[in-house]
Image (cartoon, helix red, strand yellow):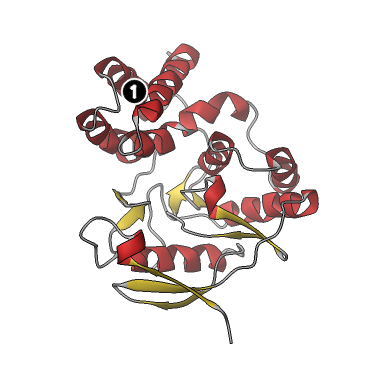
Amino acid sequence: MSRVFRKTLRGSGPPGGHPDFFAAEAAGLRWLADAGAPVAKVLAVSEDAIELEKLDTARPDRAAARAFGAVLASMHDAGAPRFGSPPTGFDGQLFIGRRPLSSVEYDSWGEFYARERVEPYLRPALEAGNLTASDADAVHAACELVANGALDDAEPAARIHGDLWNGNVMWTPAGVVLIDPAAHGGHRETDLAMLALFGCPLLDEILIGYQETHPLVPGWEGRVEAHQLHPLAVHAAGHGPGYGTALGRAARSVLDAYA
């Protein structure tokens, strides 16, 4: 019998709860698993809770990191219908952490990313006092550049985890296992940029495994800060002014590079 890790709305959900909160998590985990990703196994899900197979932890090691990079690339390659597409078969509300996440679909990555992954979190960040008007102006200007296609390429919509910070990368005796996705159709560089933003262990080895499986488009290093606008905006909406400052700095770097 599997050991069970149970999460409830009291400890994990948004204020007031939402009937789709755990259903969205379960749908994302299953969608990523369909692409061959190592994810926490869903044992049961309801409006009030989700039960996952409990994981043992282990120290990060280079072989596991490189293997994770390879499987992450393969997961991305499984694709999605369009940018913004939700997990197949799920038509409810998506979330990133406790915040709603749009599932409006686009053919253009830049327009999708600016309109649905960055701009929705700016007003909450301003209202919380975590983002200055000057930094917000810089982010809006960067979003216009991105929305107009400054970073668009021929990459198709990837099947991304969507909230791939270090805390959602579990190192186990069997290798890396992913938890807590905000899964949707996005750009594969966004997952990698989030790993870099929050300091994933052995990221260099992860990137080696990734590049050996599906090389990144040349110049990807210069696009990292653009792909970090989304997680920084989400965090600026509710986790303090330090994230607002970092968001403004990343936006100005995008403007310097592409304006």
Q: Residues within 10 Å of mark 1 (few under 14, many from 20)?
A: many
Residue 150 location, x and y as percent?
44, 24
According to the picture, the residue beneath numbered tag 1 turns out to be 139
Residue 125 location, x and y as percent?
27, 32
Residue 201 in view of the camera = yes
* 1 relative to 133, above or below: below
Q: Is residue 224 left or right of residue 25?
A: right
Residue at the image position 57 percent from the left and 63 percent from the top: 35
Placement of the C terminus among the 4 image quadrants: top left
Front-most of residues 195 and 145: 195
Q: Is residue 48 left or right of residue 222?
A: left
Secondary element type, mark 1: helix
* 70 relative to 10, above or below: above
Front-most of residues 34 and 150: 34
Residue 152 in view of the camera = no
Residue at the image position 72 percent from the left and 64 percent from the top: 173
Amino acid type for the residue under numbered disc 1:
Val
Residue 214 location, x and y as percent?
68, 45
In the displayed image of the protein, which residue is found farthest to the front? Answer: 11
Residue at the image position 59 percent from the left and 56 percent from the top: 75
Front-most of residues 151 and 198: 198
Image quadrant assignment for residue 242: top left
In the displayed image of the protein, which residue is found farthest to the right? Answer: 63
Residue at the image position 57 percent from the left and 52 percent from the top: 76
Residue 105 location, x and y as percent?
33, 49
Q: How many marks?
A: 1
Front-most of residues 88 and 100: 100
Image quadrant assignment for residue 223: top right
* 189 relative to 251, above or below: below
Placement of the N terminus among the 4 image quadrants: bottom right
